[in-house]
Amino acid sequence: MELQVQLLMNTLQIGSVYVLFALGLTLIFGVMKIVNFAHGTFFTAAALIVSSVMIWGVDTAGMPIWFSYLIAFVLALLVVCIIGFVVYFFGFQHVLKDLNGSFILSIGLLLLLNGVYLILYGGVPRSIPAVVPGNISFLGASLTIQRLLLMIVAAIITIGLYVLVHRTKLGLSLRAVAEDQEAAMLQGIPYRRVALYGFLIGATLAACAGALMATVTPVTTVIGDDFLVKAFIIIIIGGLGSVLGAILGGLLIALIESFGGYYFDPSTATLAMFVLVIVLLIVRPQGILGHAER
């Protein structure tokens, strides 16, 4: 029983980050109808900024760890929003609903930004001290307070996004554009402005995931690329453009990783993910909660 609880806690911890990251990717696809292969660079940028600012804040400025992390978190979100605005304004707004163009553009951005990160930060992994030290025990399972807070913050952000999408005027516009761009424009919804908001929200979600993950794992200049592969698997399983599908897919992939990796091995768990994707593409290509093309 204790082992199963421990594995479930591991599932929720990594799954919460997967969900945040995948939500940003699926939101961008739903609104703009593009596949952004550079989405992982937003995750990487936030993680690198958090690690750098925290190291400077604690070692050089003598700030408390928690205060240094708060500053780093906010700064990471601001920088990623700026990066997101720049790449949207000069790039993605010109390839809206163009899968081929967005593919070429996003691959180019991925290579460019990864190169910039490597030049600025080098290839050495960075680790930061625990923001909130200590452990708690739950039904015999041990969990660090820091990982518990990660899950809580990720859950709050996820709930906030759900409320934004389903309970606000902006969310109504986002859903209208995702459902039918032409019909939304006929109703007076400014498509390009809504697309910008959707892109920035997606980038911010990736930044939140990166800033949270930086507290529990070493940060490298390509950390976002690893999560990008998982995110594509998640949205294929859950359904492209589906918020609930991204949540379901993220938790399912984390469950396979945690339990499959323990009872078998990580390579078997990875194989199981790809088998699941292949089966879904055959029997339900729109994903579990996605909508078939009309």
Image (cartoon, rainbow, N blue to C red):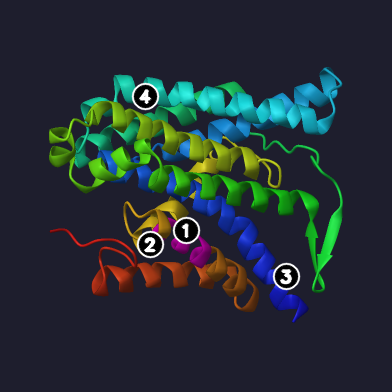
| Helix, strand or loop under label 4 | helix
At 71% from the left and 73% from the top, the residue drawn is 5
| Furthest residue in direction bottom, as rendered | 1
- What amino acid type is highlighted by mark number 2? Gly
Residue of label 2: 238
User: Where on the picture, by quarter, is residue 196?
Assistant: top left
Report if the CB atoms under discs 1 and 3 are less than 8 Å apart. Answer: no
Q: Marks 3/2: CA distance? A: 25 Å
Image height of 277 relative to 15, above or below? below
Residue 220's spot in the image, x, y percent?
61, 38
**Are the residues tagged 4 and 2 within 8 Å (C-beta)?**
no
Q: Which residue does the numbered mark 1 point to in the structure image?
A: 247
Residue at the spot x=68%, y=27% of the render? 72
- Classify residue 40 as left or right of residue 66: left
Q: Is 48 contained in the magenta span?
A: no
Closer to the N terminus: mark 2 or mark 1?
2
**Quadrant, the C terminus:** bottom left
The amino acid on which the numbered mark 4 sits, given as a three-letter code, is Val
Q: Tag on residue 6?
A: 3
Q: How dense is the environment of label 1, judged by Cα within 10 Å: few (below 14), some, or many (20 and up)? A: many
